[in-house]
Amino acid sequence: NAGVMQNPRHLVRRRGQEARLRCSPMKGHSHVYWYRQLPEEGLKFMVYLQKENIIDESGMPKERFSAEFPKEGPSILRIQQVVRGDSAAYFCASSPSQDEKLFFGSGTQLSVL
Amino acid sequence: GENVEQHPSTLSVQEGDSAVIKCTYSDSASNYFPWYKQELGKGPQLIIDIRSNVGEKKDQRIAVTLNKTAKHFSLHITETQPEDSAVYFCAASIGSYKLIFGSGTRLLVRP
């Protein structure tokens, strides 16, 4: 049973470009969470999605950031017009249902030049 | 707002000694407390967790204790080994699905 798969592992973008981060949850998991980690800090909640629904996006900036989890395919975290402050590690986690253990992927390290 | 305080930020122990990491949470409604281990370049790995109806849980060399009155929980690692060296994060639940993480403890086990 493969774990949570994230790609790419590393993503380099210039200021103003778009970043698209992908996450495939563990098999059987329909709940996906995105967290952001700045260097030397803990993870900060961004958004919680179920298939085709955004449940809670309270931790995600209202501008430039969006997330989706379509019926088919991976969950996507999209950052438009990236700025240097967006540089961070973005982790995806999944769970079989709400109020269950979260399993994290290996993350995508986004670097904005 | 809700927060989780974690101490110490760095911890260095001799192989074979015990390591203790402490966390304090602010939301009295928190009822789930996981601990994650993060190695360099990898994602957080769940190592042990505890729910609020339990005061202590043990899994081989790792144990977690919870004091709900004090809003305090701790990770105990006994007989530490070099492969235990990593960054450890505590977290507390907010509502039924959100986790608030501590700022991490970098553990170094000296051989």
Image (spheres, coloured by chain):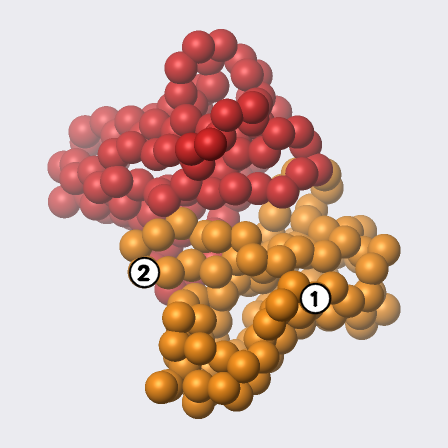
Taking A91 as reference, is B16 left or right?
Answer: right
Q: What residue do we see at 42% from left, 23% from top?
A: A75
Within-10-Å neighbours for mark 2: few <14, some 14–19, many 20+: few
Taking A45 as reference, is B75 left or right?
Answer: right
Tell me the mark number nearer the camera, choosing from 1 and 2.
Answer: 1
Q: Disc 1 vs disc 2: Cβ atoms closer than 8 Å?
A: no
Please name whichever residue, A5 or A91, is drawn nearer the observer in this view of the structure. A5
Q: Which residue is mark 1?
A: B58
Q: CA distance from mark 1 to mark 2?
A: 26 Å
Q: What residue do we see at 52% from left, 62% from top?
A: B89
Residue B53 image point, x, y percent:
85, 55
Q: Amino acid at mark 2?
A: Leu
Residue A92 image point, x, y percent:
44, 37
Q: What residue do we see at 30% from left, 54% from top?
A: B41
Question: Which chain is drawn using orange?
Answer: B
Q: Which residue is mark 2?
A: B40
Please name whichever residue, A27 or A6, is drawn nearer the observer in this view of the structure. A27
